[in-house]
Amino acid sequence: MSSAAATHWQANAPSILGEFAELLAIPNVAADPAALERVAGWIQAAMTSRGIDAEVVSLDGAPPVVVGRIEGVADAPTIGIYAHYDGQPVAPERWASPPFTPTLLTRKLEDGGEEIAFPMAGEPVDPDWRLYARGSSDDRAPIVVLLAALDAVPKRHNNVVFLFEGEEETGSPHLGEYLAHLDERLQADIWLICDGPVHQSGRAQVVLGVRGFAEIEIEVFGPPHDLHSGHYGETAVNPGVGLAELIVSMRDADGRLHVAGLEGPPLSETELVAAAAVPDPEDLGFVVNPDGSYAERLLHPLLNLRGLVSADVGDAARNVVPASAIASIDLRLVAGQDPAQMIEAVRAHVSAQGYHLVDSLPTTAERLEHRRLARVTGIAGYPGVRTSPDDSMVRGVVELVTSVTDEPPLLLPSFGGSVPLHHFVEHLDAPLVILPIANHDNNQHSENENIRVGNLRYGLEVMVALLGGGDEPASG
């Protein structure tokens, strides 16, 4: 740890936790515009109280963003820092403590952690403590550690521009508009997306991309209404069986794709080498797919069956040939794939399996002419992005994290999840790197979300290094 980060944490960890608790006490559910306004106002006030030029900017119909600039040396690099301040919905009855009452535990709840009072000034702080609240890890932690780094480093070398968004949890529908509106203010040599967890092993990681997203619904039609299975089971087409066969024709049980046109672009040798160096997660609670490494598989597209409905089951089951069967599918796409084209590839595949495609419920004439009928609809979400491991700015981030942790971080070529980060590439034209700080077991998007206190300290170390003033400890 740099002298500035070490000195500041040792002297001020209780106050950092206290300020974080103040922020976490403001509800941040993405569906609550008034709450998001309060969070944005709190962030702006915290920045301006430290002498930083920060502004709340609003577009019609969208939660505000907080943008600003931290001045360093004129000819030094400019680093962009992104985080989001909105959070997932909460079901308070499922939480061990109220989701917007920050609660400090001696360790992880599942490991028998007990609630303790927040430390007072001068009291020791245990890195294994857990702070529980919605948004504690996803994704308000980077904001509070940047504030702490500003206190730790009064003289900064690097220039920093920041953007804190308020609708990431609803798909960032206005992020592109904001970036287009603010592009001149947000020019940077590299953008760091401070979101997500460190590796499951606890090691720091630098992530170079995310997968894109599209969603598809396939409905296979059978008879005009449910039919008695004994009378018509061999005569009428069974849409449940047909849909199951379609799914199997598109992918196997281990996720390998069999849809022409859905393959991803060729992978570079450096990407494959980087992925091979990332250890597989351990003890996930289920038998994992043995086909290749976890990190390497994330570099390929995925067709996932996320839901399947056809007639009834259990006590409601009836002896029928169902009238229809519906599958809900999410596509996880890699950089270089166009979501709309991938939906068309699936449509073409369904057609190639002998299905006549319709755009609405089949007409009587269509039912009499075609035995196999299906409807394929889709929503083309957004493309994936991936920065090359060979990029000089990536090497600089790896060196920076190494200076903090005393060992090279794991270089993960891509997260498996999807975030609309393509807007940064399209509007700001700068390399993009994801730099997570949260612990991997943070219950992201679930009840009892938490942040390990030691990961907050790691975040402070990273932010101090990013500001470029690690050997300039704050006085007092």
Image: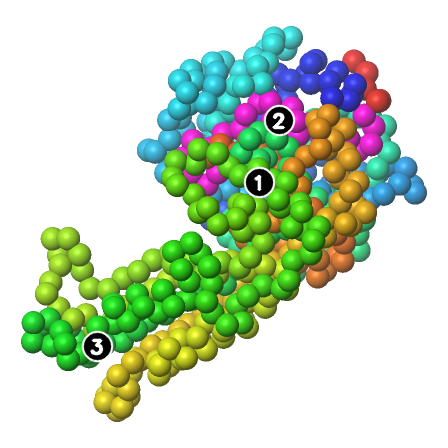
Q: Earlier in the sequence, mark 2 or mark 3?
A: 3
Q: Residues within 10 Å of mark 1 (few under 14, many from 20)?
A: many
Q: CA distance from mark 2 to mark 1?
A: 13 Å
Q: CA distance from mark 3 to mark 1?
A: 46 Å
Give x and y (percent) for residue 174.
60, 58
Give x and y (percent) for residue 197.
57, 37
**Amino acid type at image mark 3:** Val
Above or below residue 36? Residue 105 is: above
Left or right: where does residue 429 sit relative to residue 373? right
Above or below residue 143? Residue 352 is: below
**Amino acid type at image mark 2:** Leu
Left or right: where does residue 365 sit relative to residue 319? right
Q: Residues within 10 Å of mark 2 (few under 14, many from 20)?
A: many
Above or below residue 301? Residue 135 is: above
Residue 196 badge: 1
Q: Does the stretch in magenta take in 468?
A: yes
Query: Which residue is at 59% across, 68% downward?
Result: 338
Residue of label 2: 456
Left or right: where does residue 201 sit relative to residue 472? left
The part of the chain drawn in magenta is: 444-470
Quadrant in which residue 86 is drawn: top right
Query: Which residue is at 11% across, 53% downward?
Result: 315
Residue at the outermost right position = 75
Residue 202: tell me if it is visible: yes
Left or right: where does residue 120 sit relative to residue 460? left
Residue of label 3: 237
Quadrant in which residue 409 is drawn: top right
Above or below residue 345? Residue 298 is: above
